[in-house]
Image (spheres, rainbow, N blue to C red):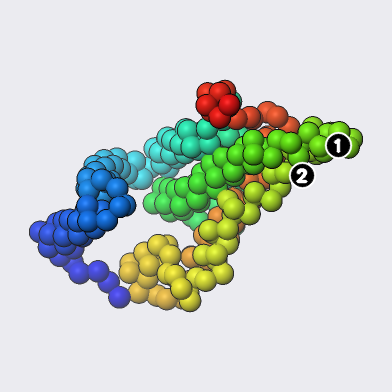
Amino acid sequence: MQLTPHLLGPVLIVVCALMVLAAAVLYWASTLGAALTVPRAALRAVLQLSAAAAVLATALRNLWTSGLVLVVMFVAAAVTAARRSRCDRSWLLAIALAAGMASVLPLLLGSGLVPMKGTAVVPVTGIILGSTMTATAVAARRALDMLTVRAGEVEAALSLGFGDREARMEIIGATATDALLPNLDQTRTVGLVTLPGAFVGVLLSTGSAAQAGAVQILILLAILLSQTSAVVVTLELIARGTISRSREIRSGQT
């Protein structure tokens, strides 16, 4: 199964424009939000992917330039997770992201399952990094929200003799499932409800369902380990008080 060789052309532009227009009309006709929400997002996606395609076409030819691309991707992921988490010293979330990536990349590269080529390392790392970034940001935000809402329970635990870390962990431990649930659900339902991007991409490029399935399983399980590692480190940083709710948000809530 392969895509039509005429994918890049006026038909693609027309079909994409129709989908964006239809979504914009639905936004306008309902209470979802401003009609320009989807067109703006679509335009941003086109510009970003066009720039990325132009850079990657050159960068992926060499391993060292691919490494530079990965560094930029990691920094962007760390900044995004920090901004979404809304916490003080949010740059420390880069430690959680690094822990997540360090838990899987040596295994993937060392085993040879992901060859040391830019065309393989960058896409696989990007998929895992993006999912880990989302889980890290959600875990941090949910844990800090829970500490704010249930501050009285933390004080009660402290009065019972719990240490600071243990008292906070009693409250935030369960929030980890919120961050990990989307990928857990996708892993449980893959092949039955969903056909993830890696599976579809390999299937369209090679036509081999077996190879597509193997690649998708590898990536899904790598994401599970990476996300779990990153979330564990995130909760530990919050439980120890190393990361806390930002002062501006605390002031707004009071």
Q: Is residue 143 left or right of residue 195?
A: right
Q: Which mark is residue 170?
A: 2
Q: Is residue 136 left or right of residue 76?
A: right
Instruction: Measuring from the top left, give residue 89's x and y in whole percent.
Output: 58, 25
- Comparing 231 with 117, the one in front is 231
Q: Is residue 230 left or right of residue 2?
A: right
- Comparing 169 with 202, the one in front is 169
- Comparing 135 with 196, the one in front is 135
- Above/below status of 187 relative to 139: below
Check disc 1 and report the residue beneath it: 162
- Asked if residue 53 shows in the view, the reply is no
Q: What is the crowding at mark 1: few (fewer than 14 residues within 10 Å), some, or many (at least 20)?
A: some
Badge 2 amino acid: Glu
In terms of sequence position, does the residue under pointer 1 or pointer 2 come before the other?
Answer: 1
- Asked if residue 59 shows in the view, the reply is yes
Of helix, strand and loop, which one carries label 1? Answer: loop
Instruction: Measuring from the top left, give residue 57's x and y in whole percent.
Output: 29, 46
Badge 1 amino acid: Phe
Q: Which mark is residue 116?
A: none
Residue at x 70% of width, y 29% of height:
241
Instruction: Measuring from the top left, give residue 232's x and y in whole percent.
Output: 68, 45
Q: What is the crowding at mark 2: few (fewer than 14 residues within 10 Å), some, or many (at least 20)?
A: some
Q: CA distance from mark 1 to mark 2?
A: 10 Å
- Comparing 236 with 211, the one in front is 236
Residue at x 22% of width, y 48% of height:
35
Quarter of the picture containing the N terminus is: bottom left
Q: Is residue 89 left or right of residue 6?
A: right
Of helix, strand and loop, which one carries label 2? Answer: helix
Instruction: Measuring from the top left, give residue 72's x and y in whole percent.
Output: 42, 35
Quarter of the picture containing the C terminus is: top right
Residue at x 20% of width, y 59% of height:
22
Q: Farthest left residue?
A: 10
